[in-house]
């Protein structure tokens, strides 16, 4: 029997601390959890903060582990049911922990939004995790839980056994996290490598027999029923939805998903597009990348007051079998507070809930589905049919 139910790795960073505080307030009675990181002093200071929330946490176990020390990560993975990690960029620091969890048969959840990392981890560790029973679940924050579970929630409102089409429209009123900013910068700089990894993944990942799954890019348009302007959003989210759809026949014999950012006003869309274009161009130059990465470095974030004013909404339109449905997933600050909540609840879900038998690299919809929706709803996020 494992010593712990959940270990939080990278607990002393900005998002890691928020996740630890969420667990301090919301972990169920009897949950055996621990903090892990490379700096014992920082872990002890964080434990002191958590003890102010719940004095029983004054003796919370602390585990010393480092991404540069695979044996320390293997020891952590061997000691727990589930590891939740906030240590990114994952392409730079993440693989040793994925390898350790795959080898030990340990559940794994992270916050990556890096398509190249997810594809490379599938190629390197899916087979081993399938053999050991490990569930490797990437993208357990704003990338990509609202979109993955939202598409699943929408599909379940539509008829079975017919072609289905779902479009997701994302609106956000919040500052991006440092980790998200750096992820986008690095992804733009590594487009060639990412494309190569995607092709290798596609060749190794068998398509579902007798079914078609498409994640088409789509084009700019006015959103039906709202008057908003929409532009394709080239994030990891459509890729994750596509993997969920390939794993379940409930998405129908022919499933198509498209993913957009929605804006109330055309000038806002134009400004966002121009900013994204400038970021892509700057990412191709090493000096510019270095300078930009310092503007919003990981480990820092907005004040609690600013986060309290932040929000997100993802509206889905679904159609199939002659029926149509509109749904919405919404919540508070997406880059920090809700991301910490989603990561923590994903870890608790893997550790405690009665879930479908899955193994290998799986998505949140495939591994946790309705159980995670129920958890997040109880925790204050909204999943609703409009």
Image (spheres, helix red, strand yellow):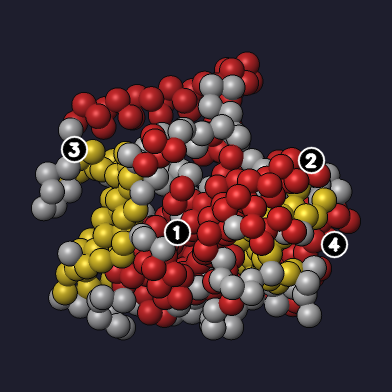
Considering the image in quadrants, where does the C terminus appear? bottom left
Question: Mark 3 falls on what kind of element?
Answer: loop
Which badge, 2 or 3, is on the more N-terminal residue? 2
> Which class describes the residues within 10 Å of circle 3: few (<14), some (14-19), or many (20+)?
some
- How far apart in space, not on screen, are marks 1 and 4 (Cα)? 29 Å
- How far apart in space, not on screen, are marks 2 and 1 (Cα)? 33 Å
Which badge, 2 or 4, is on the more N-terminal residue? 2
Residue 314 in percent (x, y) is at 30, 53
Give the mark toward the camera: 2 or 4: 2
Task: Please report contact status of discs 2 and 3: CB closer than 8 Å, yes or no.
Answer: no
**Residue 145 position (above or below residue 158):** above
Which badge, 1 or 4, is on the more N-terminal residue? 4
**Residue 190 position (above or below residue 53):** above
Question: Mark 1 falls on what kind of element?
Answer: helix
On the image, which quarter does residue 93 sit in? top right
Give the mark toward the camera: 2 or 1: 2
- How far apart in space, not on screen, are marks 2 and 4 (Cα)? 20 Å
Residue at the disc numbered 1: 145
Residue at the disc numbered 2: 41
Considering the image in quadrants, where does the N terminus appear? bottom right
Give the mark toward the camera: 1 or 4: 4
Task: Please report contact status of discs 3 and 1: CB closer than 8 Å, yes or no.
Answer: no
Residue 37 in percent (x, y) is at 76, 48
Question: Mark 4 falls on what kind of element?
Answer: helix
Which badge, 3 or 1, is on the more N-terminal residue? 1
Residue at the disc numbered 3: 264
In the image, 154: left or right of 147? left
The residue sitting at 57% across, 53% down in the picture is 53
Task: Please report contact status of discs 2 and 4: CB closer than 8 Å, yes or no.
Answer: no
- How far apart in space, not on screen, are marks 2 and 3 (Cα)? 47 Å
Residue at the disc numbered 4: 75
């Amino acid at each position: 029997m494992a010593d712990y139910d959940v270990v939080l790795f990278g607990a002393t960073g900005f998002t890691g601390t928020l996740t630890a505080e969420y667990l301090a307030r919301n972990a169920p009675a009897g949950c055996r959890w621990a903090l892990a990181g490379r700096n014992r002093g920082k872990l002890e200071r964080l434990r002191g903060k958590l003890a102010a929330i719940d004095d029983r946490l004054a003796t919370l176990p602390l585990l010393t582990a480092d991404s540069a020390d695979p044996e320390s990560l293997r020891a952590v993975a061997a000691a727990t049911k589930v590891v939740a990690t906030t240590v990114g960029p994952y392409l730079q620091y993440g693989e040793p922990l994925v390898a350790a969890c795959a080898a030990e048969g340990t559940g794994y959840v992270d916050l990556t939004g890096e398509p190249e990392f997810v594809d490379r981890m599938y190629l390197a560790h899916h087979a081993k995790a399938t053999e050991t029973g490990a569930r490797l679940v990437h993208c357990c924050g704003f990338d990509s839980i609202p979109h993955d579970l939202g598409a699943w929630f929408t599909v379940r409102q539509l008829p079975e056994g017919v072609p289905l089409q779902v479009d997701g429209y994302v609106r956000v009123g919040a500052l991006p996290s440092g980790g998200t900013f750096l992820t986008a910068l690095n992804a733009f700089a590594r487009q060639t490598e990412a494309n190569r990894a995607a092709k290798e993944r596609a060749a190794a990942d068998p398509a579902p027999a007798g079914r078609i799954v498409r994640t088409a890019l789509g084009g700019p348009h006015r959103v039906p029923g709202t008057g908003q302007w929409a532009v394709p959003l080239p994030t990891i989210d459509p890729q994750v939805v596509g993997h969920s759809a390939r794993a379940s026949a409930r998405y129908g014999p022919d499933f198509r998903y498209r993913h957009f950012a929605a804006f109330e006003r055309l000038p806002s869309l134009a400004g966002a597009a121009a900013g994204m274009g400038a970021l892509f161009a700057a990412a191709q130059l090493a000096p510019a990348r270095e300078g930009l990465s310092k503007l919003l470095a990981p480990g820092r974030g907005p004040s609690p007051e600013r986060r309290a004013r932040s929000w997100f909404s993802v509206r889905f339109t679904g159609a199939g079998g002659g029926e149509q449905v509109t749904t919405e997933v919404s919540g508070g600050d997406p880059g920090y507070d809700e991301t910490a909540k989603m990561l923590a609840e994903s870890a608790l879900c893997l550790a405690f809930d009665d879930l479908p038998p899955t193994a290998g690299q799986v998505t949140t919809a495939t591994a946790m589905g309705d159980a995670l929706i129920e958890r997040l709803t109880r925790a204050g996020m909204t999943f609703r049919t409009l």
